[in-house]
Amino acid sequence: MTERHGASTGVVRGTGAGGAGGSGRIDKRRAILDAAFVVFARRGYAGACVKEIAAEAGVAKPTVYNHLTDKENLFRRAMEATADAVAEENLAVLDRLRTPGDDLEAALDDVAFRLLKVCRGERAGALRWLTHAQVAEFPDLVVAVQERTAVRVADALADRLARLTLAGRLRAGDPAHAAEQLLSLLTGPLELRSRLGTRPISTAEARAIAERAVRTFLRAHATGD
């Protein structure tokens, strides 16, 4: 696989080994996984080599093997760790809906835009690209990444929408379906306008996508109060 230009430096940086004892081992493993994701995003799976990953992490090549066994395991663990990190970013955004305030539409606008901001980020974009690029070789990894990202985010959003329904701010219905609809209204136009991540989307475009998604969602789910 050839190098993927545009995903070489800004995705995530290796943090170095650092630390001592048990916490040092955890920090070193984290640094290796961070560095591995940078290199895989830069080179693709086939083009990446453990030597470059070790250099990116600031450790010796044998240290990488001691922690992660082989290149395939390194790739899987790096993808899973990055998926967890992207999901945590999204879950932090959804916390805004725990206390949306009096203006629910404004709160949803804010959440929708910030979710798109995460999705537009280099790390999330590289994660999608690597997942799709390796679907033939690692089909199970698609499931693992989706479970850690899309499924977790959809479940958390469904929980927030269920709470809003109980508070009388949204119509009664299936919150899981409502969450799926809102996320689809966001990610569908984003993927189309960005040409599957190959074209940058401006802040203004992202905000417009978010606002249209929320308007459509509220027409279907708002109580009308």
Image: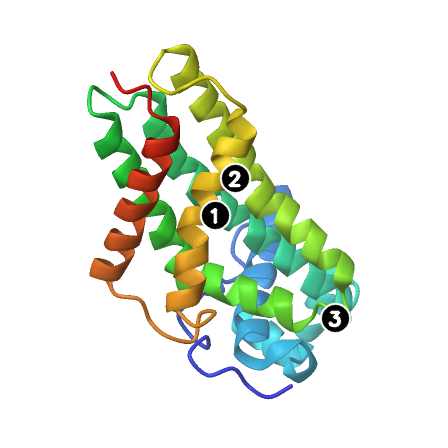
Where, by quadrant of the figure, is residue 47 drawn?
bottom right
What is the spatial separation of the Cα atoms under label 2 and label 3, in whole angstroms? 35 Å
Q: In this view, does 205 lie above or below 220?
A: below
Residue drawn at x 46%, y 44% as measured from the top left: 183
SS for dot 2: helix
Work out whether residue 52 or residue 37 is closer to the camera in this orientation and state it: 37
Q: Which residue position holds label 1? A: 184
Label 1 CA crowd tier, 10 Å (few <14, some 14–19, many 20+) = few
Residue located 23% across and 21% down the image: 101
Q: Furthest residue to the top? A: 167
Q: Cα distance, mark 3 to mark 1?
A: 34 Å
Which residue corresponds to mark 3?
Answer: 71
Q: Residue 180 carries which label?
A: 2
In terms of secondary structure, where does tag 3 sit? helix
Residue 182 % position (x, y): 43, 40
Give the percent coordinates (x, y) of residue 222.
33, 25
Does residue 15 lie above or below 60 as drawn?
A: above
In front here: 161 or 39?
Answer: 161
Q: Describe residue 109's horizontal placement relative to residue 135 as left or right.
A: left
